[in-house]
Image (spheres, grey):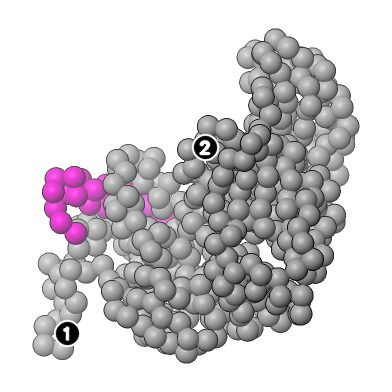
Amino acid sequence: MTVRFTVNDDPVELNVPGMRRLLDVLREDLGLIGTKEGCGEGECGACTVLLDGAVVDSCLVPVGQVDGHAVRTVEGLARRRPSAERPAMPDDLNVLQMAFLETGGAQCGICTPGMLMAGEAFLASGRPATDHAIREAIAGNLCRCTGYTKIIEAIALAAARRDAGATQ
Amino acid sequence: MIEPPLASPDDLAAAYRLLAEELYRPLAGGTDVLVALSGRSGPPPDRFLDLGGLDELRGITLDGDGLVFGALTTYTEIRRSPVCRDLLPAFVDAAATIGAAQIQNRGTLGGNIANASPAGDMLPVLLASDATIVAGSARGERSIPAASFWTGYRQTALARDEIVIRIRVPLVADRQVRFRKIGTRRAQAISKVVLALSWVAAAPERPWQSVRLGLGSVAERPIRAIQTEAFLEGRLPTSDTAATASVRVAAEIEPINDVRSTADYRRAVTGRVLHRLIREAGGW
């Protein structure tokens, strides 16, 4: 079937089986390999992306249901994308990515894209960044390095900067 | 991954026509059925029918003395619904325990019902609330009481051309509904035991009437503990009542050992949770 949607604000049109997982479309058809596959069963949250701003496990979303909707992946977080002429620079990162970098919120890195998307959805919700609220926001994301403390610190730091008026 | 064909009808009539012609696996939020695409737990269904385009199946509406949920109502929508929070807070409590935000944003009440897992978290609440499940097909609509909907292990009363279209929950004056889920952790856990208890009492010191006890993960399907309900009927939530009821329910259920828990643990914890709910209701 033909599906049309946006990924990180870019329009996409694909002719793919409707039951193809959004995760596979992103990684294999669109080359967006920032989104990781962990368990493939909706348990670990590694493949978390935003669908119309809401966190979803992209391993559980058939692309046929994405037709007409907006997807945001970890590649869409940075304020500026690197190019051949201009390599990536730390100040390209958005507030949340920078906070992860500063607090050591990433260890092996496989949960990081999903944690960032869950954190991004939490920041966008505008909810007060209590410890409980942050923990609930990332309850669907497993970190096998068990680096939760620094991930929670990173989201709290980003929320504090958001509240102080920093732009994304 | 296996990628079977997907039909995406635009309205309910078109969906019914397709279902009348061929056997489809209905697809709502996908949180259960997408896992089948790996083929690791057997061959996936031959073809899927996407219900996502059927706006007739959306929304939470007050209808006389009942609250009606479209089958595509997500757990997030239940959690955020002011009318649900006011009138059926146990539904909000239960929806909040399912998976985490990723699952709650996609998973639907109708999907939980049709998937018919014995561990389905919303199902004991539907049993305890005397909910009615409305099934639809090209032949028309019919209402099925929750108590007779799940007929065996992952079996339902739906005919092969029927889908769940909405759920009606009667709003009963002075009814209390309590929900408790026991899992390995608070989020992302499939339940070891899930329990919903309801009763009608005009005041805390009045005897309980219309007692319902819905249980999940303790049998091959979601069940009501009829004998324990009968014991609790007409009683006050005293310590004697709680002690006897907890023994009765442990004897009444027939849980199994599986990857998530043991039969012994499930019996013990079901009794303890019931005891606690009665104690909290009694305020002692």
Look at discs 2 and 1 and give the one toward the viewer. Answer: 2
Q: Chain of mark 1?
A: A
Quadrant in which the C terminus of chain A is drawn: bottom left
- Asked if residue B252 lies left or right of residue A69, the reply is right
Q: Is residue B274 above or below residue B91?
A: above
Quadrant position of residue B240: top right
Q: Give the magenta-colored segment's residue range.
A: A142-168
Does A151 appear in magenta? yes
User: Which numbered dot is residue A83?
Assistant: 1
Q: Could you confirm whether marks 2 and 1 are on the same chain?
A: no
**Could you say where residue A159 lies in the image, as x and y percent from the top left?**
24, 48
Q: Is residue A168 visible?
A: yes
SS class of the residue under badge 2?
Answer: helix
The numbered dot on residue B83 is 2
B103, B80: nearer the viewer = B80
Out of B232 and B60, give the one closest to the viewer.
B60
Question: Relative to B112, does residue B25 appear above or below in the rendering?
Answer: below
**Residue A55 tag number:** none
Q: Amino acid at mark 1?
A: Ser
Cα–Cα span, label 2 and label 1: 50 Å
Q: Is residue B41 visible?
A: no
Crowd tier of the residue under label 2, counting other residues whose Cα lies within 10 Å: few below 14, some 14–19, many 20 or above: some
Left or right position of B21 against B231: left
Amino acid type, label 2: Val
Decide: few, some or many residues near mark 1? Use Cα within 10 Å; few <14, some 14-19, many ≥20. few
Residue B113 picture location, percent across and down: 70, 55
Q: Is residue B253 magenta?
A: no
